[in-house]
């Protein structure tokens, strides 16, 4: 893993250089010199002998971990692999000598990198709080420290183990990377080599995914933001780190090292044996703060790497004590990410302001009503997630000082869920995500200046600012995700009349035109008719229509959207019957996930053969009056999962494999779920 530490420290230095301010320009030459010196180190730790030693250590560790699961043949073949790796190492010299020399050298290198990164972090923390002569002295001192670090790197390179070039080693390395095959009994060895062969950034991303506790369901969006905050994504001019993090996740999914959690949609977990392998690596490398047990009242034990430190936990009451933040300050002054859920007090500890290197702060589903004034000290913060916060929550002016903020996710737990933001929010020029805001009071017009936004969620939309808001959104040409929720109309929800849903009518929606790159759209509120512009959204992949209560067929406009993959219709149509025209042959060519939630729907009569040619999952949620599934469903051969969430008992009986008269419609579906409960809120969280 030595190469990972070198690479990540280089990325950290390059990220510092990209800030391009006068303070850092004063030491630019010294930083560039160090980056170039680390190139030389990285070239050496990529030597085939290093790779072979690492493979041997991982094979031995994995054998110990997996012994109970391996047959005798499997154990023998794993031992054979270890012997082959030892033989490969002997090509470069004595195995034990090389191993001892390399381990000592890597340990020294890692310690030096740890101290060097502490030096960089301490300088940045210190210098931005200074002015005048004090600042000049700190810059001069840091320049001298960088020169010292450069010298130490040179000294370490001069003491590097002597490893001669060996074509045989390179051939063995290439062989193990590309052609080494295993049978079923030795599949675990194949997993081990798959892991070893990962590029550094993917390997570290996989390890990081294992840092989340089992109860901490992680959505793709959250995982992307945490990977960026952890420094695992190289920052390059003109490129968004979030796009690269998304690419890494997709690659890990394609490799089978990360998979979607079947119990909570859009959440991911590391499957075995990669999870077990990653945990053993984390323990050996001391990569993370160990995460707390959800039932524990003790703070986590601090561990760190030269690169990043994280803590994720839930349900800890810290009022009146030093608590988690104090523990992080004492044990880990460079803590990069803190995630709390169900934080049970109404105040966030002022200690958070001391974590000046913090880049991710999440306090979802908490009871806090305000952020401490010390929040303005977090000049490196990239993500602030206060979704579903306290009843009286408003955003203070201190947030406007968070110049590096990239993602601001908010939502109150009462009323319309909107959060008031201070005037001047457009000063946050790095902000890509802004969710849960109220756009009244001049904020709607200000949004038009935030052309860097990629995700926007506006709540409590009303007539007094709708026109201004639509005009601003149309200027956001890079926007990919948009959610609009209208204000509540004050009418209590009454299950006997589904029109009384509490939402007002969308104002002036016909005057709106969506940004060209929009991929995800959520409209929550009543519609008199389907907006015609919906039919021209060629890039749209996800559409959520909630509480629309349309009297017309909403699929008439939607059926021929070329890239639509996800469609949720929650009380979108108030008719009692869905006829064949809802899903015509060739309609919804790429739709994979369809969810229908309706108190009104009684019967879905027919699907035309050839409709829904790509459908993988069909979900009915809270369709308590639905008695009949459509004829033709048996022809949707791509369907893999049918979810029936809180539906009528008679429908379950009719579909039963034990003599149900309509079972023929669904017997081709591999997974059918009958559950009498609503899907968890986490499903709807991006």
Image (cartoon, rainbow, N blue to C red):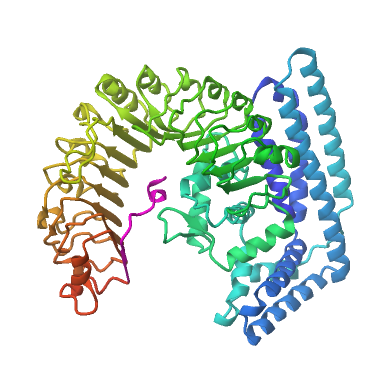
Residue shown at the point (45%, 54%) measured from the top left: 267
Please give the name of the residue rendered at 21% of the width and 40% of the height, measured from the top-left corner: 548
Query: Does residue 232 sit above or below 51 in this rendering?
Result: above
Q: Residue at x 73, y 39 (%)?
A: 35
Across and down, in percent, residue 146 comes to 81, 33
**Residue 431: image x %, image y %?**
49, 30
Q: Please tell me in which quadrant of the rendered image residue 67 appears.
A: bottom right
Which image quarter is the C terminus in?
Answer: top left
Q: Is any part of residue 572 visible from this angle?
A: yes
Q: Is residue 370 left or right of residue 141?
A: left
Q: Position of residue 407 (x, y in %)?
A: 50, 34
Q: Nearer the viewer, residue 361 or 89?
A: 361
Q: What's the magenta region? A: 671-686
In the rendered view, does 572 fall on the left or right side of 452? left
What is the quadrant of residue 174 in the picture?
A: bottom right
Q: Left or right? Give the position of 424 relative to 272.
A: left
Left or right: where 142 falls relative to 182: right
Image quarter for residue 207? bottom right
- Residue extending farthest to the bottom is 72
Q: How many numbered badges does the structure rendering display?
A: 0
The image shows residue 594 at horizontal and vertical percentages of 27, 55
Q: Would you place residue 660 above or below residue 449 in this image?
A: below
**Residue 98 shown in magenta:** no
Q: Residue furthest front?
A: 320
Quarter of the image that includes the N terminus: bottom right
Does the rendering let one see residue 516? Answer: no
Nearer the observer, 593 or 104: 593
Q: Residue furthest top?
A: 132
């Amino acid at each position: 893993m030595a190469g990972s530490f070198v690479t990540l420290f280089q990325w950290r230095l390059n990220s510092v250089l990209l800030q391009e301010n006068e303070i850092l320009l004063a030491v630019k030459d010294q930083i560039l010199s160090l980056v170039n010196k680390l190139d030389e180190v990285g070239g050496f730790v990529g030597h085939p002998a290093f790779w072979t030693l690492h493979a041997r250590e991982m094979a031995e560790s994995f054998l110990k971990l997996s012994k109970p699961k391996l047959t005798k043949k499997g154990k023998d073949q794993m031992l054979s692999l270890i012997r082959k790796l030892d033989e490969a190492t002997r090509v470069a010299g004595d195995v034990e000598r090389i191993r001892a020399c390399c381990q000592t050298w890597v340990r020294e290198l890692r310690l030096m990198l740890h101290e060097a990164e502490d030096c960089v972090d301490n300088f940045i923390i210190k210098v931005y709080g200074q002015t005048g002569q004090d600042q000049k002295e700190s810059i001069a001192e840091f320049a001298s420290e960088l020169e010292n670090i450069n010298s130490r790197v040179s000294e370490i390179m001069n003491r590097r183990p002597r490893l001669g070039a060996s074509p045989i080693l390179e051939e063995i390395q290439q062989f193990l990377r590309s052609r080494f095959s295993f049978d079923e009994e030795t599949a675990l060895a194949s997993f081990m080599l798959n892991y070893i062969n990962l590029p550094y950034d993917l390997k570290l991303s996989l390890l990081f995914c294992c840092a989340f506790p089992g109860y901490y369901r992680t959505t793709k969006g959250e995982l992307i933001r945490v990977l960026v905050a952890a420094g695992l994504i190289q920052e390059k001019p003109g490129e968004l780190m979030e796009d690269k993090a998304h690419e890494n996740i997709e690659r890990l999914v394609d490799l089978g090292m990360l998979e979607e959690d079947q119990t909570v949609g859009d959440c991911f977990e590391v499957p075995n044996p990669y999870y077990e392998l990653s945990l053993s690596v984390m323990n050996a490398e001391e990569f993370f703060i160990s995460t707390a047990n959800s039932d524990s009242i003790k703070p986590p034990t601090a561990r760190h790497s030269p690169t990043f430190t994280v803590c994720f936990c839930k349900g800890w009451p810290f009022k009146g004590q030093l608590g988690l933040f104090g523990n992080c300050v004492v044990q880990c002054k460079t803590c990069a990410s803190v995630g709390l859920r169900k934080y049970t007090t109404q105040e966030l500890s002022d200690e958070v302001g001391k974590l000046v290197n913090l880049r991710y702060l999440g306090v979802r589903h908490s009871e806090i009503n305000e952020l401490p004034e010390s929040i303005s000290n977090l000049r490196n913060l990239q993500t602030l997630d206060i979704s579903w916060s306290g009843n009286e929550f408003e955003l203070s002016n201190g947030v406007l000082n968070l110049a590096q903020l990239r993602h601001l996710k908010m939502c109150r737990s009462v009323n319309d869920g909107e959060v008031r933001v201070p005037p001047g929010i457009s000063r946050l020029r790095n902000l890509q995500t802004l969710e849960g805001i109220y756009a009244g009071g001049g904020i709607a017009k200000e949004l038009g200046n935030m052309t860097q936004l990629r995700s926007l969620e506006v709540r409590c939309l009303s007539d007094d600012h709708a026109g201004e808001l639509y005009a601003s959104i149309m200027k956001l040409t890079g926007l990919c995700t948009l959610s609009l929720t209208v204000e509540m109309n004050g009418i209590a929800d009454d299950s006997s009349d589904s029109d009384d849903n509490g939402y007002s009518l969308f104002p002036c929606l016909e005057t709106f035109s969506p940004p060209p790159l929009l991929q995800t759209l959520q409209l929550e509120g009543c519609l008199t008719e389907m907006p015609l512009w919906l039919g021209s959204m060629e890039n749209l992949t996800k559409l959520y229509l909630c509480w629309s209560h349309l009297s017309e067929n909403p699929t008439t406009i939607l059926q021929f959207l070329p890239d639509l993959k996800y469609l949720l219709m929650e009380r979108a149509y108030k008719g009692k019957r869905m006829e064949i025209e809802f899903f015509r042959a060739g309609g919804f060519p790429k739709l994979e996930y369809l969810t229908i939630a309706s108190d009104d729907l009684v019967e879905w009569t027919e699907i035309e053969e050839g409709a829904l040619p790509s459908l993988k999952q069909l979900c009915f949620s809270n369709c308590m009056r639905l008695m009949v599934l459509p004829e033709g469903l048996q022809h949707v051969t791509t369907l893999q999962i049918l979810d029936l969430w809180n539906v009528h008992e008679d429908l379950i009986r009719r579909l039963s494999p034990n003599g149900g008269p309509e079972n023929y419609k669904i017997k081709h579906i591999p997974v059918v779920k009958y559950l009498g409960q609503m899907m968890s809120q986490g499903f709807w969280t991006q």
